[in-house]
Image (cartoon, rainbow, N blue to C red):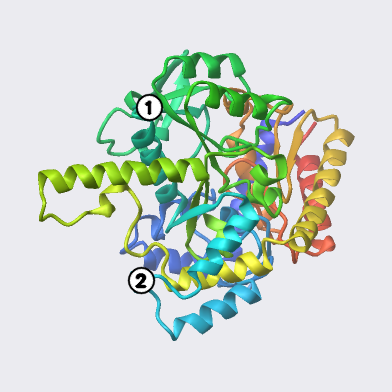
Amino acid sequence: MIRPAAVDALLAREQRDFIARHPRSAALAADAGRHWPGGVPLHWMADWGTPFPLSVAEASGATLVDVDGHVITDFCLGDTGAMFGHSPPAVAAAIAAQAARGLTCMLPDARVAAVGAALAGRFGLPYWQAAQTASDANRAALRWARALTGRPKVLVFHGCYHGLVEETMVRLRGGRTVPREGAVGSAFDHASAALAVEFNDVDALERALAGGEVAAVIAEPVMTNCGMVLPEPGFDAALRALTRRYGALLVVDETHTLSSGPGGYAGEHALEPDLWVCGKAIAGGLPCAVWGMSAEVEARRAAWLARRDAAAATAMPDAAQAHGHSGMGTTLAGNALAIAALEAALAHLHTDATHAAMRAGATRIEQALRAAFAARGLDWHVSRVGARLEFGFGPAPRNGSEAEAQDRPLLGQALRLWLLNRGLLMTPFHQMLLAAPTLAPSAADALCASVAEFLDEVSA
């Protein structure tokens, strides 16, 4: 149904239009390239498939303004980091108020007790630690899982993404766990510390756990890195039952599924994780992450620390006890600015009202996209979790391999550039969209109408 020649022609035309419309971004990219590789401070910022990076002048709510003055409706929202919109007023006010009173002290802020209680009340786990990013939080959670179980490996699902955690950067190829392609500067064979199985494959999950090597299963409750893959009925229950049966801890990484509801996907679906991790949007867009522990995990952790300290005291009576070696995080974790933003976000953003507005926008988009695909005879799917939705170029996949197989990078690049030239920003990999709580219905309709126009341009 899609004509490759039409896609090529459209992409070339849209690239020319982008260059003509963004002279200021072009100049800034050239200047930045003298000191920043690719003209960007983080390489992902150059992954949009545009002729040069787009520079932003300001952002507010669901809207960006680029340096050439174009107003853009943002459906990427910082790849979830600004899920609640750019600079939510309550968070912006909290950051401004705290900025004059100290940014970081490596001492607990006066609000820590209240924020801990709010995290426990919202997400259901009683004990918490802070980190700067979800990568840091995942790394700490997995270190503790290995320490508490005495087991060497973690289990991940093929196609997953858990940040820059080395042992999760693996893939399943030909039935074997192998290092993920393209990993840079690996210090060890990542596959030596991990097992990978397909999502939704309960039999493969049980076979891997039965070997007794797995300290923890770390899972996105909905796969989001290779496209959106939803759990099949019964998979969540089987995952929880099997990890308990074989003594592995269950780590739920909610960094990309926080859009599911006020308590995340785990709260909405009663997953009962042993450890729960979230970054990106947890503090309303300010860099911050948290990881929570069940009462049982915290009791085991406290006992482990007591044994370690007793052994150290016997071996080196005068040595200080170095809790930092336990993977608890960096000196900036839990800083006062992050705590201020986290407190405001928990009170004003992680609410039923906010999520209801976000779900309404996402539902509107989902229905319109489904109708557009059906009207053109396309078998493309739309998957949604709360305020997050993605569409793919084929039927809904059940695992990471199926999601990878239906990817069409050139088609996706052409679509994203088409939308961007019409003031609509979509995430630069697969077709992920987020509906901010401030998204206007007319903006949602404009997105879907533009997708339909694109399909008319490139389809037979």
Residue 119 percent location from the top left of the image? 58, 58
Q: Is residue 346 visible?
A: yes
For label 1, the crowd category at 10 Å Cα-Cα, with few meaning under 14, some 14 to 19 and many 20 or more, is: many
Residue at position x 50%, y 52% in the image: 127
Q: Compare residues 132 and 17 and report the one nearer the observer.
A: 132
Mark pair 2, 1: CA separation: 34 Å
Q: Is residue 159 above or below residue 322?
A: above
Give, as a three-letter code, the residue at label 1.
Answer: Lys
The answer to which of 117 and 415 lies nearer the viewer is: 117
Q: Residue furthest bottom?
A: 100
Q: In which image quadrant can residue 139 be found?
A: top left
Please count the marks in the image.
2
Residue at disc 1, secondary structure: strand
Residue 256 image offset from top left, x and y in percent? 59, 47
Q: Nearer the viewer, residue 438 or 28?
A: 438
Tag 2: amino acid: Leu
Query: In terms of secondary structure, where does tag 2 sit?
Result: loop
Q: Up-down: is 272 above or below 261?
A: above
- Residues at marks 2 and 1 touching, judged by CB atoms closer than 8 Å: no
Using residue 223 as the reference point, say whether residue 302 is left or right of it.
Answer: left
Numbered tag placed on residue 282 in the rendering: none
Task: Give the left or right position of residue 431, taking residue 35 as reference.
Answer: right
The residue carrying mark 1 is: 153
Q: Earlier in the sequence, mark 2 or mark 1?
A: 2
Mark 2 neighbour density, 10 Å: few (under 14) some (14–19) many (20 or more): few
- Residue 427 location in percent, x, y? 61, 50
Q: Please state, as top left, top right, bottom left or bottom right, where the C terminus lies in the image.
A: top right
Where is residue 238, by image quadrant? Answer: top right
x and y, in percent, of residue 16 in the image: 59, 55
The residue wearing badge 2 is 107
Question: Mark 2, mark 1: which one is toward the viewer?
Answer: 2
